[in-house]
Image (tube, rainbow, N blue to C red):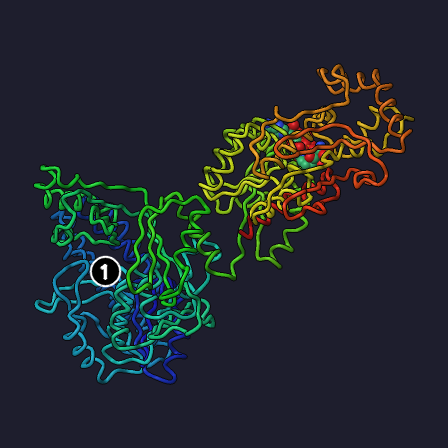
């Protein structure tokens, strides 16, 4: 025998019921089946609403009742032919008339007890079962209608009655002795053992009805037919990547359903677990879909974590105090007081110091819990041995479930690591010694981010999402966007990585799109959005969106933006930046930023600060981390100046070559920063700091070659004019070097803690002599590289290489 249960959506309309009929017909070909049905989708809520209105003396209850009647009558008319529907209609109308009388009674005496409500709610399933069984019979299926109230026996706890399993099983066995091929029974409804009053098994209790019948009859399988394709790895409304779980053990299913996975009603599992009956969750609307199979043993080599579930809103109640330490009956009294008030404890944590106990409860229970605990411990609270109860709200629970977590090293580490990298603070943790479930309590605002990042971490098939926020869409920024656009498909396919740009800004405007900005059209979107750029608001928006794996890219040369880094890093948002301002600011600020990144588990990456896309800083970091010591750096670090001295031969104006460098995108937004040597000073300063030296910009001696008068200009035009006025100076510098067959390079040196920068002329045998185009070269002299320096060389400026350096930093974050 199979027991099939169909939920409210499956039986909501005549069209759905035709699908149900086909499933039942197919299943009943090879064995007898019991069909347990819920009320038509939405009816139980309407029955309840109607009851409340009637009890408040509101005439409008009649309108709700009318719509309940209409749904059932229409269903009869749609499902049954004129010839066959008479009996069904008569019985349906009789039931509805009874219901009308009961509502009128509630309306007149303005009273609605849990007992009356159970009576009223039972009509939903009773009506649907009656109509469905007649429909099956009319289409040729051998069907008998049975009344679950006759055989599911409970106590008198109206609203959520407790089943008397022994009596119920005996009665079921008797009732089904001569069962038809198909028996249809209403779910959810029962009656009290002692006085036969109507009771219900709690919302969702039809699953329970099915489980009790299956257990009593030792059914081969129980099938829960619903509107989703099984139990999901997470709540799909919060985690779009969630997918159905193929196979669960009973214990896993129980854990998942207890923590909010709504597909199966938690008490359902116990009877089938005891009787070792497999439960199959299937989708009525995609009956070929394999769904989820719940049985005794899950697959040996399945996923370690099967799924996550959550309760979106809970409260934590914490009792603390020195009077709790080593006092034996505190927990007994605490839980006793909660139990007397019928407060359900969702989770418990207690530190081994015994100084505090925290329990998680539903929000509705806060007042009862506060009163119960305050009364129970009133003496200790008055005498200051125990502090008044602390209640915190705005919290959510996440549970990670999987029986293979047992004895598996590293699961909680991975969970905590994932949450901490996304800046999620864990407020409480619980794990039972069964290791089946790890539960964490977090701020409700972090729920979506947490669930998604946990899902990405534990389900390898998931595509990881990276959310980028880019400030500065100039020369480098634009090329970076093009590179992202070109790589998105490749990264998704080959690296399971979705890279989205969720925010963009220039100095005038900003634009956000949580799901990812359309990169075909980003300029128009930014222009037409009319949201004025406001640096503080940009950061606030990134924080508010609270997206997992967020990275802020600063592709400006602005000090204002560099000042935001600390706040951004402390919000656990990583920073990738080609802007050198922050790393070449005061040593203390630089240190504070690197420390903040460590503390808040964000990344602060600035490879492109030196040598654009060249691996200069990562190489240096590798040397230092592996224990090497740098004592000398010699480098040509300005792409602009190298380009200028590789192209200037005194036949053209010096200013023309400077402008060509700017047009090629090698210079800083203000080329005076390059020409003055400041850009090179910043770069050598950053290399010295990464090498472990505490240096300031002022400690560097800069031997500039451009006359002061050119530098002290108010605009770029004025700068170029002044360069022209001093053109002879540059000609002389060039000629002098050329006469000696030397080439000019702007060199930065750092030797044993001291640094200088300036123009030098090199002979043909020097490694700098042949440094072409806008190339950079860096020579690291270290303990390990003492005979020959370690050399990094290549294009050191230009939008394409810089953007790819930014991209490389972002990929480091993605794979961290
Ligand atoms: N070019 C290269 O080869 C390399 C460059 N870099 C660094 O890359 C960075 C970007 O250079 P590049 O693209 O050439 O510069 P651009 O001048 O071409 O672009 C700068 C961008 O930053 C925006 N911006 C400036 N100030 C602000 C602000 N306060 N708020 C928001 N946006 C702002 C600008 O907006 P708007 O247009 O509205 O002014 C513009 O979109 C610089 O820090 C540079 O040092 C690093 C390595 C190599
Ligand atoms: N303006 C810089 C670009 C990179 O930092 C240079 O010319 O090297």
Quarter of the image holding residue 720? top right
Q: Of helix, strand and loop, which one carries label 1?
A: loop
Q: Would you name the residue on which mark 1 appears?
A: 202
Q: Quadrant of ligand 1?
A: top right
In front of the other: 309 or 666: 666
For label 1, count other residues whose C-alpha is less than 10 Å away and answer few (under 14), some (14-19) or many (20+): some
Badge count: 1
Which quarter of the rendering shows the N terminus? Answer: bottom left
Quarter of the image holding residue 269? bottom left
Q: Position of residue 736 (x, y in %)?
A: 88, 25
State whether residue 241 is above or below residue 128: above
Q: Position of residue 219 (x, y in %)?
A: 29, 80
Position of residue 573 in the picture relative to residue 704 (left or right): left
Question: Does ligand 1 reach within 8 Å of label 1's beta carbon?
Answer: no
Q: Residue at x 32, y 42 (%)?
A: 394
**Residue 337 visible in the picture:** no
In front of the other: 699 or 400: 699
Q: Position of residue 505 (x, y in %)?
A: 59, 33
State whether residue 198 is above or below residue 712: below
Position of residue 812 in the picture relative to residue 214 (left or right): right
State whether residue 235 is above or below residue 136: above
Position of residue 123 in the picture relative to residue 683 (left or right): left
Position of residue 96 in the picture relative to residue 643 (left or right): left
**Residue 650 visible in the picture:** yes
Q: Position of residue 234 (x, y in %)?
A: 41, 58
State whether residue 10 is above or below residue 742: below
In front of the other: 90 or 664: 664
Q: Residue at x 46, y 47 (%)?
A: 421
């Amino acid at each position: 025998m199979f027991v099939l249960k169909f939920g409210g959506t499956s039986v909501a309309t005549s069209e759905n019921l035709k699908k149900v009929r086909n499933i039942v017909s197919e299943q009943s070909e090879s064995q007898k089946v019991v069909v347990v049905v819920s009320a038509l989708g939405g009816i139980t809520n309407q029955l309840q609403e109607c009851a409340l209105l009637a009890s408040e003396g509101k005439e409008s209850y009649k309108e709700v009742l009318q719509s309940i009647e209409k749904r059932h009558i229409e269903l009869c008319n749609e499902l049954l032919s004129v010839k066959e529907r008479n009996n069904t209609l008569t019985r349906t109308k009789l039931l509805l008339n009874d219901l009308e009388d009961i509502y009128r009674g509630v309306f007149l005496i303005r009273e609605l007890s849990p007992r009356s409500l159970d009576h009223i709610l039972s009509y939903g399933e009773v009506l649907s079962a009656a109509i469905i069984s007649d429909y099956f019979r009319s289409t040729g299926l051998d069907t008998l209608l049975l009344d679950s109230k006759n055989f599911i026996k409970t106590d008198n706890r109206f609203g959520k009655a407790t089943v008397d399993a022994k009596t119920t099983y005996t009665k079921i066995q008797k009732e089904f002795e001569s069962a038809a091929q198909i028996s249809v029974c209403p779910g959810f409804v029962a009656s009290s053992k002692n006085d036969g009053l109507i009771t219900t098994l709690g919302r969702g209790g039809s699953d329970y009805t099915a489980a009790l019948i299956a257990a009593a009859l030792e059914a081969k399988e129980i099938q829960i037919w619903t509107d989703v394709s099984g139990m999901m790895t997470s709540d799909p409304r919060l985690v779009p990547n969630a997918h159905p779980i193929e196979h669960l053990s009973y214990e896993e299913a129980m854990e998942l359903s207890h923590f909010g996975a709504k597909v199966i009603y938690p008490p359902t599992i116990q009877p089938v677990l005891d009787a070792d009956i497999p439960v199959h969750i299937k989708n009525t609307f995609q009956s070929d879909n394999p769904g989820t199979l719940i049985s005794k043993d899950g697959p040996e080599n399945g996923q370690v974590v099967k799924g996550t579930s959550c309760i979106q809103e809970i409260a934590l109640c914490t009792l603390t105090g020195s009077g709790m330490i080593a006092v034996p009956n505190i927990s007994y009294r605490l839980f006793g007081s909660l139990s007397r008030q019928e407060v359900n404890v969702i989770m418990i944590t207690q530190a081994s110091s015994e100084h505090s106990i925290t329990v998680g409860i539903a929000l509705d229970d806060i007042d009862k819990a506060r009163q119960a605990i305050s009364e129970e411990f009133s003496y200790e609270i008055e005498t200051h041995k125990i502090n008044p109860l602390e209640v915190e709200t705005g919290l959510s629970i996440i549970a990670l479930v999987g029986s293979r977590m047992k004895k598996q090293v590293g699961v909680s580490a991975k969970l905590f690591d994932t949450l901490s990298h996304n800046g999620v603070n864990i407020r409480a943790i619980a794990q039972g010694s069964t290791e089946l479930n790890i539960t964490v309590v977090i701020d409700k605002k972090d729920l979506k981010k947490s669930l998604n990042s946990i899902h990405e971490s534990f389900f390898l098939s998931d595509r990881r999402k990276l959310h980028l926020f880019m400030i500065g869409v100039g020369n480098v920024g634009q090329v970076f966007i093009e590179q992202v656009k070109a790589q998105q498909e490749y990264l998704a396919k080959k690296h399971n990585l979705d890279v989205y740009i969720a925010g963009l800004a220039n100095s005038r405007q900003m634009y956000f799109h949580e799901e990812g900005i359309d990169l075909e059209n980003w300029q128009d979107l930014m222009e037409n959005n009319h949201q004025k750029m406001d640096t503080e608001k940009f950061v606030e928006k990134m924080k508010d969106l609270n997206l997992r794996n967020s990275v802020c890219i600063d592709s400006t040369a602005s000090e204002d933006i560099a000042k935001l880094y600390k706040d951004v890093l402390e919000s656990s948002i990583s920073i990738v930046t080609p802007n050198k301002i922050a790393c070449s600011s005061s040593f203390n600020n630089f240190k504070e930023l690197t420390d903040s990144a460590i503390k808040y588990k964000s990344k602060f990456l600035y490879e492109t600060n030196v040598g654009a896309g060249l691996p200069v800083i990562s190489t240096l970091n590798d040397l230092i981390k592996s224990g090497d010591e740098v004592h000398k750096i010699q480098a040509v670090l300005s792409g602009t100046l190298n380009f200028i001295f590789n192209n200037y031969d005194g036949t053209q104006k010096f200013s023309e070559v400077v402008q060509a460098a700017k047009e090629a995108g090698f210079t800083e937004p203000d080329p005076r920063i390059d020409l003055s040597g400041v850009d090179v000073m910043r770069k050598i300063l950053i290399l010295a700091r990464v090498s472990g030296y505490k240096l300031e910009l002022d400690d560097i001696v800069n031997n500039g070659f451009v006359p002061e008068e050119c530098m002290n200009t108010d605009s770029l035009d004025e700068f170029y004019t002044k360069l022209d006025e001093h053109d002879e100076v540059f000609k002389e510098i060039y000629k002098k070097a050329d006469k000696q067959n030397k080439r000019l390079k702007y060199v930065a040196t750092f030797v044993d803690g001291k640094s200088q920068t300036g123009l030098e002329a090199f002979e043909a045998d020097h490694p700098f002599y042949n440094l072409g185009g806008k190339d950079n070269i860096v020579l690291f002299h270290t303990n390990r590289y003492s005979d020959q320096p370690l050399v990094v060389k290549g294009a050191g400026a230009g939008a394409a290489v810089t953007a790819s350096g930014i991209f490389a930093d972002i990929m480091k974050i993605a794979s961290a």
